[in-house]
Amino acid sequence: MSKAQRTKFIFVTGGVVSSLGKGIASASLGMLLQSRGLKVTILKMDPYLNIDPGTLSPYQHGEVYVTDDGAEADLDLGHYERFLNIDMSKHNNATTGQIYYAVIKRERNGDYLGKTVQVIPHITDEIKRRILDLSKGKEKVDVVITEVGGTVGDIESLPFLETIRQFRLDVGSENLLNVHLTLVPFISAAGEYKTKPTQHSVMRLREIGIQPDILLCRAQAPLDDELKRKIALFCSVATNSVISAPDVATIYEVPLMFHRGGLDEIIVNRLAMECSKPKLSAWEKFVERVKSPAFEIKIAVCGKYVELHDSYKSIAESFVHAGVENNVRVKLEWIEAEKIEQQNPAELLRGTSGLLVPGGFGSRGSEGKVVAIQYAREQQIPFFGICLGLQCAVIEFARNVCGLANANSTEFNEATPNPVIDLMEEQKRIKSKGGTMRLGAQPCEIKKATKAHRIYGKELVYERHRHRYEVNNEFKAKLEQHGMALSGINPELDLVEMIELPNHPWFVACQFHPELKSRVLNAHPLFREFVKAALKCQKEKPD
């Protein structure tokens, strides 16, 4: 884009029902514009009153995504990072709670003396400020995409929608586009698609003062031209701006589907952006390998929130990335940790070629994870532990190899005689729950001649954290004496970051969350090598 051109703003809203995929749509749109040489960033606006999702149950909100700078954010930031291959920050996620908190603090400080503080203009001005600040970051961006959480018609979203209405007046129609994602349901009894929900959703937007420029229409199959013309007529948009968004085999096909529908071409023309043609060959090859791999393996994920797969969204996507690099489809077997406490682990893990134990909080299911890890260690099944997965691996090893009776974490049993996992010293003085864990990117020194060093190929890495408990340093010598390698150490706090068992085919665990740094065209090395080990394990199994 020419230096003389202004930053362009695209707002993405959703209608009819939730869970249509606004995050995927926003990330896909950003990726397409980025492929044309434009600098893009994305802002997620969440309408809930929590400051961030850090204290929300995964069952309510899904995964809490953590950025390098330690922000606990919406899981859609994971989609943005993976699709655009850029790092987001605390500035890329804003909640109603943050907006109101900022305004109320100013009111208490006397910034509004003599004035009545109101939603308009004070709340809407604060929302505008965050959008504009993102456009003026360290590097000037060409496009700011803002995704508004929730569904049009929700009372919680009204301040954000009012801001969008005002924003067109502030920056000019030539610098702004409204993209609305909606649903065109197929009614089996009638044997046809129905456009009325989309019409009503657009009507609600227009009542607020927003006219969508582009409609992305979710449906089971592509819409025919007649349906597109009908939607265009009743929603006052151009027919070519009604774009089909049918179900696809993989979310990574969505950008290509939008491109075939002309989405990026319409946007760059409407906003008069000077840019190159899209370069999508690498992405197309990736999608082809996702859909047509040479091999297939099954890996068990033993966790406590497995009923809602979005609780482990980044882990699931990391396996897709790692699978492509190994030319294999990874099928995940979701196992409830509490079930292993009551059943033989061999029954639940039968047919799997690897075990991953992810992060989590609280004692529920912890013993099941320990039992599963013991089975993987003794049966020589590739094992990968993340955060709490590392802690459970240390507990299992301490009990069954080091002979430390009742070894445990003080999170699960404060009276354990062998607290091999304990609350970090700096956490013992903290009372507030929000945003107070060890968060964000932290250094990890990798010891030479370890599996971790062979995987990373370097001696210092920075990985993202989200936890309060750590390996108790008082037990480090005992663990090492019995054969556990402490292969990664935080150089500043002398905390254990990685462990491994040298005499096992692949037994590696980390205190951090590597899934948060895996990218579509660059799988995280730990996931890549774990999948490679699982594939090797499967090939070596007797028929």
Image: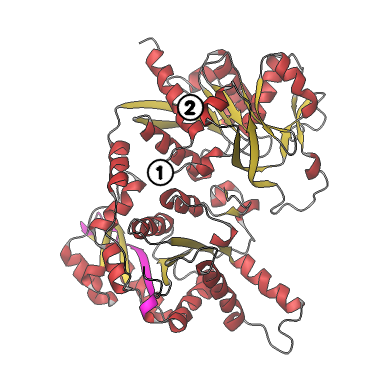
- Residue that protrudes farthest toward the front in the picture: 3
User: In screen coordinates, is 528 left or right of 469?
Assistant: left
Q: Quadrant of the C terminus?
A: top left
Q: Which of marks 1 and 2 is nearer the N terminus?
A: 1
Local crowd at mark 2 within 10 Å, few (<14), some, or many (≥20)? many
- Residue 404: numbered disc: none
Q: What residue type is labelled 1?
A: Val
Residue 271: image quadrant is bottom left
Q: Is residue 199 above or below residue 319?
A: below
In depth, the one of 481 and 304 nearer the eye is 481
- Residue that protrudes farthest toward the bottom in the picture: 114
Local crowd at mark 1 within 10 Å, few (<14), some, or many (≥20)? many
- Could you tell me which residue is drawn at 27 percent across and 39 percent down? 288
Q: What element carries label 2?
A: helix
Callout 1 touching callout 2 (CB < 8 Å): no
Residue denoted by label 1: 520
Q: In this view, does 70 lie above or below 152?
A: above
